[in-house]
Image (cartoon, helix red, strand yellow):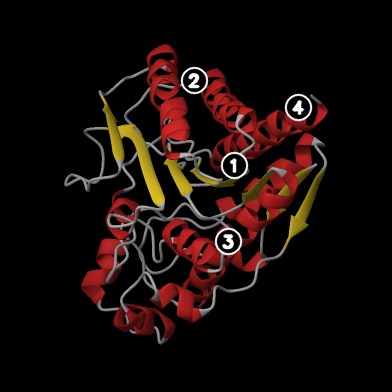
Amino acid sequence: MLHVVHHPAYVSPATGDGSFRFDKYGLVMDALAMTGAPFTVHEPHPMPRYWIEAVHDPAYVEQVATLSVPREKERRIGFAVTDRVMRRSLLSPGGTWAAARLAMVHGYAANAAGGSHHALHDSGAGYCVFNDLAIAANRLIGEGDARRILILDLDVHQGDGTAALMADREDVFTLSIHAEKNFPVRKARSTLDIGLPDGTGDEDYLAVLMDVLPRAMDDFRPDLILYQAGIDPHADDRLGRLSLTDAGLDRRDRAVMRAARRRAIPLASTMGGGYGVDRMAIARRHADCMIRLAEEARRGEQA
C-alpha cells in the first residue's frame, strides 16, 4: 500500500505574472488514481511556526505569514506570496514531516509536494518558499524520532538551500547529484556534491548513483532518508539538462529504495521538480515515481 500525504490546499492558482503552476499537485493525485494502484491519503497539518523559525530567519517567516514579502524576494522565489501560497508553504513542511513519520511505520511514504531545496535562511528562491527538507529533518531529530538523517537530492538542480541550512550539522548528511551547469549558478557545498555534465544518460547516471549512495549510507549510517525525488533529470524536462529516459528514472528510484531496504532504513520522498508543457505527462512521472518506490518497499516486506 502506498501512503501519500496530500492536502487540497497544495493546489492553488498561479499568482500574478509568475510562470510557476501549482496545478500539478492536483494532477499528480489524478494520475495516481488513474493507475489503479492502491494508495491511502493522509492529510498533513501546517508545520508549527516554531519549527520553521528554527531553520529560517524569523523576520522572513513573519513576512510570509503577513503577506509582506518584499518584491525582490518574491522575484527570487519566482511568484508572489499570496494567502493561498502562504498556506501551502506551511502545509508542505508539515507534509514532509508527516511522510517521514509514516515511513518509520510502513518503510516508505510520499509527500505529494515538497522538495523545496532552494529556500535559504532569510529568503525563498527557485520556486521554493520554505525548505521543507531542512525543517522536517531538524524537527525529526529535535523530537527524537531520528538521530541521523540522509537528505538524498536527485533533482536536476543542486539542493543549495538544503546544503546551506544543514552545513553545520553532523547529524544530517546532504547528498546532491545534479546537472553541474544548471541552476543555481552559484552552488552551495553539500556534504557530497556530484555535478554531472549536460546530456548525462541512464547508464552513466546510474553508475554514479550506485558508486556514491551505498558508500554514503554505510559510512554515515542514517536511520532515515528524506529523498528529493525530482523527475526533472528526464530528457524532455523543460528546465533539465540531463537525458534520463522513463526507464532510467524507474531504475534510479528502484535502486535508491533497494539500497535503503537492504539496510532497513525507512525512506520518505518529496516530489521536487518536474516541468513541461504537457502537465499530465509531468504528473504521471511523479505518480510513477511514488508507485515504484512503494513497490520496491513492499518487496522488502515480502522477502
Image vertical order of residue 241 relative to residue 19, above or below: above
Instruction: Please name the amino acid that badge 4 sits on.
Output: Arg
Determine which residue is flagged by label 1: 283
**Are the two marked residues, 3 and 4, in contact with CB atoms closer than 8 angstroms?**
no
Q: How far apart are marks 3 and 1 (CA)?
A: 22 Å
Q: Find the distance from the CA under tag 3 to the CA under tag 2.
A: 30 Å
Of 68 and 106, nearer the camera is: 106
Q: What residue type is labelled 2?
A: Thr
The mark that comes first in sequence, 4 or 1, is 1
The answer to whether marks 4 and 2 mark residues whose Cβ atoms lie closer than 8 Å is no
- Left or right: residue 61 versus residue 289 is left
Q: How far apart are marks 3 and 4 (CA)?
A: 24 Å
Q: Where is residue 184 in the image (x, y as percent from the top left)?
A: 24, 46
Return the residue at label 3.
Answer: 97
| Pointer 2 local density, CA inside 10 Å: few below 14, some 14–19, many at least 20 | some
**Disc number placed over residue 245 in the picture, else none:** 2
Query: Horizontally, is 214 left or right of 68 in the view?
Result: right
Q: Which mark is residue 36?
A: none
